[in-house]
Image (cartoon, grey):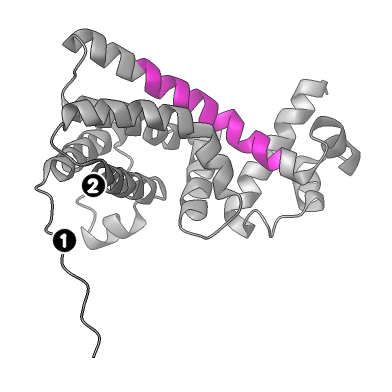
Amino acid sequence: MSSAGTRERILDAAERLFPVHGVDGTSVRHITAEAQVNVAAVNYHFGSKEALVSAVFKRRLGPIGEERLRLLDESEARAGGQPPLEEIVEAFIAPALRLRGEPEHGGENFCMLMGQLFSESSKWKQLIFAEFGPAMHRFRAALALALPDLPEPELWWRIHFLLGAMVHTLRGGEALVYLSQGQCDPADVEGTIRRLSVFLAAGLRAPVAPVLPPPVSA
C-alpha cells in the first residue's frame, strides 16, 4: 500500500471510531487495529494523537470552508454585493449538510463527530473553531450588511443559534422521523437545506427581544 493510502486509511478509521467512542475514548491502538496498520504508521504520518485528530478535522473542514466562501462569492456577484439573507445562510449551511449526504465518502461519520463535539465541553472543539474561524468572520460581515439594524452582540447571539440549529441537524433526524411518523425525510438533503435556510433567516430577522433587568435579591 502506498504511503498516501496508509494515511487515508488511518484517517478513515479515526473518523469511524471517534463518533462511537469519543475522541478521548479512542486510543491510537484502537485506530491502528481498525485501519489494519501498525502503531508506527501513526507516528510516521502524524507524530501524535493530537496531530492525527487535527488532520481528521482539516481534511473535512478545509474543503467545507472553501465551498462556503465560493458560494458566498457567487451569491454576492449575482446580487451586486449584497445578496438576500436566505442565500447567505444557505451558503454557510449547505456544504456541511451536503457532506452528511455522502456516507460513501465518510461524511455521515464526520457530521456525527461534529455534532458530538459541539454538544460536549471538549478541548477538541477548539480545532473546529480554528478551522472555520476565517470563513465565520467573512459570513459575519455579510450578515451584518444584510441586517444593518442589528446590534453587534445580538448578531453574535443569532450566529450562535444558527450554528446550534445546523449542528443539531447534522447529528441526524431519527427523532424527526419518529415524531412525524415518517412524514419527514432527513435524507432529503436539498429539501433540508431549503427549509433550514428559510427558518434561520426568519430567526435572524426577528425583532430584538427586550433585555429584562436582573432579578432583585431579597
Looking at marks 1 and 2 on the same chain, the residue that comes earlier in the sequence is marked by 2
User: Which quadrant, please, contains the C terminus?
Assistant: bottom left
Q: Which image quadrant is residue 150 in? A: top left
Q: In this view, does 154 lie above or below 62?
A: below
Q: Which mark is residue 211?
A: 1
Q: At numbered mark 2, what does the secondary structure look like: helix, strand or loop?
A: helix
At horizontal 16% and vertical 45% (from top left) the residue drawn is 203
User: Which quadrant, please, contains the N terminus?
Assistant: top right
Determine whether, in the image, residue 217 is placed left or right of residue 147. right
Determine whether, in the image, residue 22 is placed left or right of residue 187. right
Determine whether, in the image, residue 49 is placed left or right of residue 159. right
Q: In this view, does 80 lie above or below 156?
A: above
Q: Nearer the viewer, residue 143 or 69?
A: 143
Instruction: Answer few, some or many: residues within 10 Å of disc 1's Cα (few below 14, many 20 plus, some between 14 and 19).
Output: few
Q: Residue 65 carries which label?
A: none
Q: Residue 39, can we see it?
A: yes
At horizontal 47% and vertical 52% (from top left) the residue drawn is 118
Q: Does the magenta stretch include residue 57?
A: yes
Q: Which amino acid does label 2 sit on?
A: Glu
Point out residue 124 in the picture as x, y percentages from the top left corner. Answer: 60, 49
Q: Residue 154 carries which label?
A: 2
Q: Are marks 1 and 2 in contact (CB under 8 Å)?
A: no
Q: Residue 105, can we see it?
A: no
Q: At numbered mark 1, what does the secondary structure look like: helix, strand or loop?
A: loop
Point out residue 86 in the picture as x, y percentages from the top left corner. Answer: 18, 30
Q: Nearer the viewer, residue 27 or 181?
A: 27
Which region of the structure is painted magenta?
A: 52-70
Q: Which amino acid does label 1 sit on?
A: Val
